[in-house]
Image: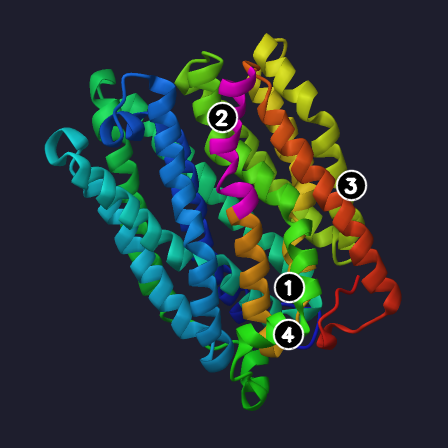
Amino acid sequence: MTSDHITKAGWKVVLLASLGGTLEFYDFVIFGVFAKDIADAMFPNTLPLVSLIASFATFAVGYLARPIGGIVLSHFGDRYGRRQVFLVSLFVMSTATLGMGLVPSFATWGAAASLTMVALRLIQGFCLGGELPGALTYVVETAPRRSGFVCGVVFSCVTLGVAAATGISLLVRTWLPPEQVPTLGWRIAFIAGGLGGVLSFVMRRAMEESPEFLRMKALAARHPFQEVLKMHLWPVVLGVTALAATAGFNGLFFAHMPAYLSGVLGYDPRQAVVAQTTGVILHAGALLGVGWLSDRVSPRLLIATGAAALALLAFPFYSALAARTIDPVWALALAGLCASLVNGTFAVVLTRLFPTRVRFSGVALGFNIAFTVFSGTAPLLATELIRETGMNTAPAFVMIGCGVLTVSSALGLSRRERLGTESTGGALQS
């Protein structure tokens, strides 16, 4: 596809490529929404905060497997093609998600239940290591001249996975008797996610190979990961730091926020879910506008502006929620709109850092390191900071640190732009 116009077939590819990422964020949020219930069922402790920390630790463990999964899956994706990796990763990931909803509780299986939950989370994380990086690589190679917009579309669809998760949570809390929500609610949510993943797998089988990869297939790298480390290590570093604000925000907003609002600040759980759902829907819509804008304005400037705003507004945001001086619906809506500047541009920034022959590997490495370090640990770190400092606004420290890193990385991205290196050499263009 060489023109600026995206054909009907091209849109089909973009939407199908987004399905796995949608499931990824669905699982991401379901764990956060039901973190307390999962903690009680799988990691019981006499101290509720310790039990919650154990639950978030299991959430973080899945992220430890992501870099390994990204290395393995992207190797095959860069060497043999993107399509098959898509199919295998989505099927295994969906099976693991389904299994998490069916694991017996600690009361039934004892420690084996906890270990099984951790093992399934590891398998899920391994497959997720190649899922969203592969989707971003695929759509950029399908519509290279509209890369900013199609990346915005992917992440908008992915974000709607969050809305689906909070929607399921609302349905569960509405239709189940209150006493059954802690024991059955999270199980229904995981089973629904697993079945949705299987359906996505069936639909994705219709996808064809990336056109840009087919043109470059004869030049495919035999050892893409080693080539990335040897020739593109600085772009990886830039990619990781550029994604710090995105990853940190996603960990706090999507996974930590529901448990934080209800478990720490004492908001009604239903109110917390409604507030997050509103913020997510507005965020998804704003991502389309930011993606369109990033084809016309330097993505580097957009991501730096968004990261600076998140860092500067972190304490006012958490202070207002803690003091109840703002309706959480308004607070989370404004946060979602603000974060669209980083979440709508990080993908195009990252994919333009690497040439086609190693793009999947480079994107997967940078993406998974960033999300493992800054997103997977954010809920756990935020909860620990609250316990250690006694400040219910302590999660703001996490967002400030991530925002500062991303703003700093913009200077490195600026230098690459001034050098004028073309994207075929692995640099970012605006």
Q: CA distance from mark 2 to mark 4?
A: 37 Å
Looking at the image, tell me whether mark 1 or mark 3 is earlier in sequence order: 3
Q: Amino acid at mark 1?
A: Thr
Q: Which residue is mark 4?
A: 230
> Would residue 426 be counted in the magenta stretch?
no
- The amino acid beneath tag 4 is Lys
Q: Which residues are magenta?
A: 373-389
What residue sits right under mark 3 in the picture? Answer: 305
Mark 1: give few (<14), some (14-19) or many (20+) Cα within 10 Å. many
Which percent across, then down, holds residue 373?
A: 54, 46
Most foreground residue, 75 or 166: 75
Mark 3 → mark 2, Cα distance in angstroms: 29 Å
Q: Amino acid at mark 3?
A: Thr
Residue 430, label in figure: none
Quadrant position of residue 259? top left
Which of marks 2 and 1 precedes in the sequence? 1
